[in-house]
Structures are given as C-alpha cells and as structure tokens.
Image (tube, rainbow, N blue to C red):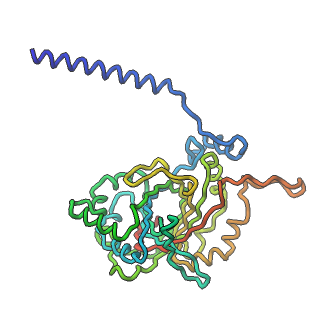
Amino acid sequence: RSTKSLYNMMVSVTKVLGVLCLAQTATSFTTTPTLPTFQQSSPLCMATVEAAETDENLTSQGLLKRDRYVATNRFAVRTNKGAKFEARWANRKSRLSELNGFKYFHLMRRVTLDEDGTCTYDAGEKSDGSNMGNYVSFTIWEKKSDFSAWRKGDAFKEAHGGTSIGAFMSTMISSALILKGPPRPAFYDGLLVQSTTPDNVPETIDGWRNVEADGKVNLPAECFIACNQFFVPADNGAAFEKRWADRESMLKKCEGFVAFSMLRRDTGGKGHGVVPMDENTEPTYLSTTIWENRAAFDKWREGTAFKKAHGAKPPSEQQGSKSEGPANPPQPLWAKPPQPVFYEGTLVISKPEGA
C-alpha cells in the first residue's frame, strides 16, 4: 500500500515538473527580444551597430569582445599602515602564477607626480572617502572563466586565510587593524590589449613572489601605471570603443612600455563585497598603461608618440576639407572630463610571454 502511494506521488511530481517545463519553454519563445539602446543622434553609434552584424570582433551590441579579464580589489589602507599592508601581501601563501589562465599581477599604491620626476604616496582622505583605492590589487586573466575557476577553488581559500577558522579569524583581525572598511572589488573586460615580452620575469616560488618585507619599509616600485578614468554613458559605449580602436598606437615602439588595455567595467560581476556601481562617481572605462618606471612614462608623454596619439582625430571622425567651411565638432562621449590617476606597482608576477 505504501509502495502504491509512493508511486502515485512520483507520478504527480512528474506531471507538475512537465507543466513547469512547458511553461518555461513557452515563455522563452514568446518573450520579445530587446535591442540595445543607442542615441539616434549619433551616426557613429548607428554605424557601429551595423558593423556588428559582420564584424566578428564585436558583440551583438556593437561592443568590442574582450581580450582579457581583469579583476581588481580596491583597499582603503589606514594612515602609516602601507608597509604593513604590503608585507601581508608579500608574505601570503598563493599559487597564483601556477593557475590556468593567469597572465599578470601587481599590487598598486596610488601616487601623485612630483616635478622632479619622483612620486609621492597619495593616501587620500578618510573624511571625503578618497582613501578608498589608495591600494589596488590588479590581476589579468586569459578568460573570465579562468578567474571564476580560481575564485571557486582551493587556491582562493589559501590566499585569503580560509583554510581554517583560526586562519580566517587571524586574517580578519589583521585586516581590521590595517584597513578602513572592507575592500571593494571591481571587474573589467580588457579591450585592445597590447603587451611586450618582458626581458626578465620576476622569480616565483610555488606560484608567488619570494621577497623580504618587514612591514616597516615600503616595497620598491617595480613598475609605473598611468590610468585615465572615463565616465561614458552606456548609450555611447560602442562609439567610445570605436574611437579608441581607430586611433593609431605606437606604444609598442616606446622604450619601457610593458602593457596596455582599455578596461570596460563588468557591471554584472558578482562575488563577496561587490556592490552596484555608481556611474556618477566611478568610471565605466579605464585606460591602463603599464610602464617599467616613471621615467619611461615621462619620456613617452614628452615625445612624438604621445602627440600623435592625442593630437589627431581617428579617420571615422575626421571632417571634410577646410574649404567646406567649419564643421560641427563631435559630441563628447563622456558625461564629465576624464580623470587621470597614477600608481606605483610592486610584487609583479608575469607569464614569460607577458600580459
């Protein structure tokens, strides 16, 4: 009797599941697909959408397909705690360089540029929140799936003190003494990637750098990073990317150049500590150029390569000849002027082929 009741229950459950599957199938076929929204007044946006139908390098929304996936974590390090924070990173256990899909890593400390060619650490202010991001971890992955696999695996737990309750509590207490509030992750699609093959790759042991860090003296700078923050509305994303794709770059010919990528914020990124992005205060795009040092950056900025890249408009935006009379300048693609930010990088880890 009980067997018959169990059989009848299984039949009923099967019927319910069947109805749900049919309903889901019907919904998937009757839902009207939505098209990406672009500003009708921008012919450049419309041209990009049309090109997406035939250009295999573009998504269906007319955006560039990612070349890399970049994961960052932004920290607000307390006053005079920078050396201790760096020592925590230097002395941590990690197998990062041995993981599938890993390409490049460095830890960045934000700086201001002094006129004598040196840099001064920019801690920011607690009162206005500008201390957030005075340190940033920066990791480049071959694919987003590689990053996801690392975050779900044992290597992530080992690096973040999650191997035991004691190790986790020790990490949390140490963080509270060094950091002002929790870190804030930010994830990006890496576009238009350029990279050189490094002459020397820093040595790693078991997947991580082996350097001396006493928590009293800052680690030496191993690279210099120049970023430009762009606040681009979603409707202008395709046009903005096309503008960058069309420009002529001579970065690889510049002495001291390491890597470049245009980072597009992945607003769909999920994970512990991820909060919705505020487009009024956070950039949607971030140009990121890594140099061997500040001197290499200064030499590029003062040379012809910089002037050529920033002086002429790309072919897609060039107007007619002067004899045709003055032409209307192209509308700005960002909501407010770009904001530069600079960093010194340390604890560099790189694949032999570069980023």
- Residue 353 in sight here: no
Q: Position of residue 231 (x, y in %)?
A: 60, 56
Q: Position of residue 182 (x, y in %)?
A: 39, 61
Q: Eyeballing the image, is 10 above or below 204?
A: above
Based on the displayed image, in which of its 4 quarters is residue 103 positioned? Answer: bottom left
- Residue 77 in sight here: yes
Q: Residue at x 66, y 60 (%)?
A: 337
Q: Residue at x 31, y 66 (%)?
A: 94
Q: Is residue 129 left or right of residue 162?
A: right
Q: Eyeballing the image, is 172 above or below 115?
A: above
Based on the displayed image, in which of its 4 quarters is residue 119 positioned? Answer: bottom right
Q: Position of residue 232 (x, y in %)?
A: 61, 53
Q: Residue at x 10, y 17 (%)?
A: 2
View extreme (bottom): residue: 116
View extreme (left): residue: 1
Based on the displayed image, in which of its 4 quarters is residue 83 positioned? Answer: bottom left
Q: Is residue 18 left or right of residue 259?
A: left
View extreme (front): residue: 127
